[in-house]
């Protein structure tokens, strides 16, 4: 499930929210944000700036110090100083990297020895971020051919990078349903891609993206509730996907693409 967009108009509130998401207590997050604005400060200064009770500032500082986010000057009264914003960000990046690595290892140990590639039925996924992740996974796993159709607003840098990487490892790339400007961009950034006309006029439909990888994995998405590709609501897209040689969605779309290829080869269509 996608979270709401991170607020940018109130950096104070945004910083506190993100620090809490990284696991800091509310008092520790408020204390760190106060120190970021004050520079060097006493517990009394922090309490005034953060609305953290003075007696709890010391607990918050202990929490922050334990994670390497605050330095303490042994003076009377004690003074505290937050590390720089860049160093703070790098600290959390390293922590997230360690946690992600540990999670991947644990989940890999839980997976069956042989994953069944034949997914029965059609599966759904909601939210632009989750759909993009699923598309990236299909692109990164492709060995032979990728067919990808989308509207301009959904052709992100991450998607372009994945298409370029696939082309570099010898995968055939066919891309359709984009504007002339985006076609020029794709030809520059993925020079091996073949560009083709869409099966329909995408601007007249709520279509989001349609893709097939290696003729065995496919995904179709639509924009919901009147949203456009430029919508700020990350939840305004839903998709269905299927995998396997005999999966019903794969079979239908593979037949459509084959029909289109024959039609183009006969010179009977644009």
Image (cartoon, helix red, strand yellow):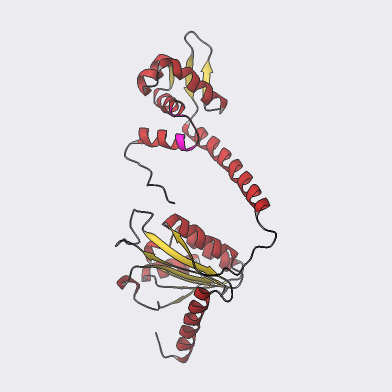
- Per the rendered image, the range of residues in magenta is 20-26
Q: Is residue 10 left or right of residue 104?
A: left
Q: Tell me where residue 204 appears, x and y as whole percent.
A: 30, 72
The front one of 110 and 134 is 110
The front one of 159 and 137 is 137
Q: Relative to 163, say whether 4 is above or below.
A: above
**Residue lying farthest to the right in this orientation:** 113
Residue at the spot 51% in from the left edge and 60% down from the top edge:
134
**Residue 23 counted in the magenta span:** yes
Residue at the spot 40% in from the left edge and 72% down from the top edge:
177
**Residue lying farthest to the front in this orientation:** 121
Residue at the spot 47% in from the left edge and 85% down from the top edge:
259
Q: Relative to 169, say whether 262 is above or below.
A: below
Q: Tell me where residue 149 appears, x and y as whole percent.
A: 44, 71
The front one of 25 and 257 is 25
Q: Quadrant of the C terminus?
A: bottom left
């Amino acid at each position: 499930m996608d979270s709401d967009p991170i607020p940018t108009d109130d950096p104070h509130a945004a910083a506190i929210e993100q620090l809490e998401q990284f696991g800091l207590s509310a008092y520790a997050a408020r204390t760190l944000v106060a120190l970021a604005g004050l520079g060097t400060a006493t517990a009394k200064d922090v309490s005034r700036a953060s609305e953290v009770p003075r007696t709890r500032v010391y607990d918050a500082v202990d929490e922050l110090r334990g994670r390497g986010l605050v330095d303490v000057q042994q003076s009377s009264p004690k003074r505290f100083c937050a590390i720089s914003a860049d160093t703070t960000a790098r600290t959390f990046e390293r922590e997230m990297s360690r946690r992600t690595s540990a999670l991947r290892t644990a989940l890999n140990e839980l997976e069956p020895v042989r994953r069944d590639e034949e997914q029965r039925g059609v599966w759904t996924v909601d939210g632009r971020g989750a759909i993009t992740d699923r598309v990236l996974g299909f692109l990164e796993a492709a060995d032979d051919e990728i067919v990808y159709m989308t509207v301009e607003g959904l052709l992100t840098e991450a998607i372009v990078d994945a298409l370029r990487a696939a082309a570099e490892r010898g995968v055939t790339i066919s891309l359709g349903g984009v504007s002339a400007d985006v076609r020029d961009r794709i030809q520059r950034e993925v020079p091996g891609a073949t560009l083709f006309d869409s099966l329909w006029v995408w601007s007249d439909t709520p279509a989001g993206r349609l893709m097939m990888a290696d003729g065995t994995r496919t995904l179709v998405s639509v924009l919901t509730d009147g949203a456009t590709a430029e919508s700020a609501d990350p939840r305004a897209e839903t998709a269905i996907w299927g995998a396997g040689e005999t999966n019903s969605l794969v079979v239908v779309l593979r037949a459509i693409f084959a029909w289109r290829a024959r039609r183009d080869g006969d010179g009977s269509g644009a």
